Image (cartoon, helix red, strand yellow):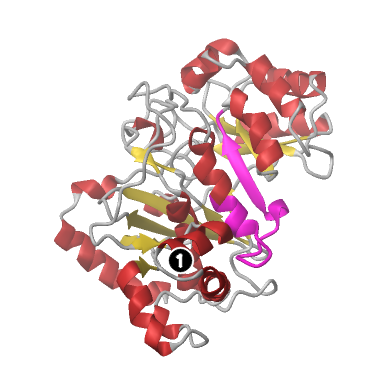
Amino acid sequence: MTPAMPIPGHIDPVPVPRAATLRADGRVDLIGLTKDQLRATLADAGLDTKQAKLRAKQIWHWLYNRGATDFSAMTDIARAQHPWLAERFVVGRPEVVEAQVSSDGTRKWLLRSPDAQDYEMVFIPDADRGTLCVSSQVGCTLNCTFCHTGTMRLVRNLTAGEIVGQVMLARDSLGEWPSQPEGRMLTNIVMMGMGEPLYNFDSVRDALKLVMDGDGLALSRRRITLSTSGVVPMMARAGAEIGVNLAVSLHAVTKEVRDELVPLNRKYGIEELLQACADYHGASNARRITFEYVMLRDKNDSDADARELVRLLRHYKLPAKVNLIPFNPWPGANYQCSTPERIRAFSAIVFEAGISAPVRTPRGRDIDAACGQLKTAAEKKSRAQLDREAAAALPALA
């Protein structure tokens, strides 16, 4: 087991990983278990070795290829065994507390766990792809000053099952069962929702292995991106043990400004972070590292900042793409978005140096689903109001 690692932030230290909260009904949720864990769980419940192996293979197929949530739908398992399974196990999905649809088609779900913790996920449709933005923690500890999520306290890590459950729920909502490799609306996953994925390493790794399993959800590792604010000690492990695309929340090119925007920089500085990027397993011109850079007026958007960004990327010989993100406002924010002219000028300097620097089109702003806006503000609403809003949203999500 990975040794506990302290997390900086509102609650410091927080041991990782935390024990999962057991369900009130005592049943075991099968979502999130590896094949070996599923087989062992069935054996522990009383099946003999041969039967546990067979049933695990059957159940796995129904869970991840057919999207079944009820044992009675598993037609190749004897009907007499369905009640036995239902008494001991459950095929979980996050509870949907609130579902919203943006005017641009972006969808956001406020989800609730069995222990009443709330978190969010977002689906962003495009003409040639559909990207699911997945959360890894309830809350966040990083305190990035431009990010609404960063104003939340960390409550706990999400389990592997809760992370995979977001993907399963999105597949449910999009009608993408049985699982097919072609013609999917959900083509990409980004670990860019609530939380810092590398401070929940074990659960994120285990969840993404299920997503990438050829017998499971079968999404290519090239279609998955893990975003970090720069947890340097865990980056090498992420490359070796997960191997997905890497995105880094950079947002500044000087120590003074990044210390303010991303306080983690006080622990792992820019040079240390960029060296870890240069060493990242699998990074190449074909698999460039993406640097996220939120554009903040008169803070990090000058021509000098753009030139320093180019210098740093060249110095560390990084195969890089820079996503320029117009700042998405939220109540109480102390920053303003750079002007369109300033963003274009910044982008042009980076492009002219031979580094891709597209400007990301804000998506889902009207439902607070854009980058840096995720926060469970729904806590302020009554449960009756949330139930009414969720019911009203269902036809739009069908």
User: Which residues are drawn in magenta?
Assistant: 207-229
* Few, some or many residues within 10 Å of mark 1 (<14, 14–19, 20+): many
- Looking at the picture, how far across and down is residue 65, in whole percent? 58, 74
Q: Work out which residue is located at the far front of the displayed protein and give it.
A: 48
Residue at 65% of width from left, 21% of height from top?
273
Residue 329 location in percent, x, y?
A: 41, 38
108 left or right of 359 in image? left
Q: Which residue is mark 1?
A: 42
Asked if residue 228 is among those painted magenta in the image, a careful observer would answer yes
Give the residue displayed 41% in from the left and 26% down from the top: 143
Q: Measuring 53% from the left and 48% from the top, which residue is drawn there?
A: 362
Q: Is residue 280 shown left or right of residue 230?
A: right
Of residue 31 and residue 141, the one placed in the foreground of this image is: 31
Q: Give residue 217's quadrant in the image.
A: bottom right
Query: Which sits in the foreground, 150 or 25?
Result: 25
Name the one closer to the observer, 330 or 235.
235
Going by the image, does 377 lie left or right of 91?
A: left
Q: Residue at x 70, y 52 (%)?
A: 221
Q: Quadrant for residue 61, please give it.
A: bottom right
Q: Which image quarter: residue 344?
A: top right
Residue 266 drawn at (x, y percent): 52, 13
Callout 1 secondary element: helix
Q: Is residue 43 magenta?
A: no
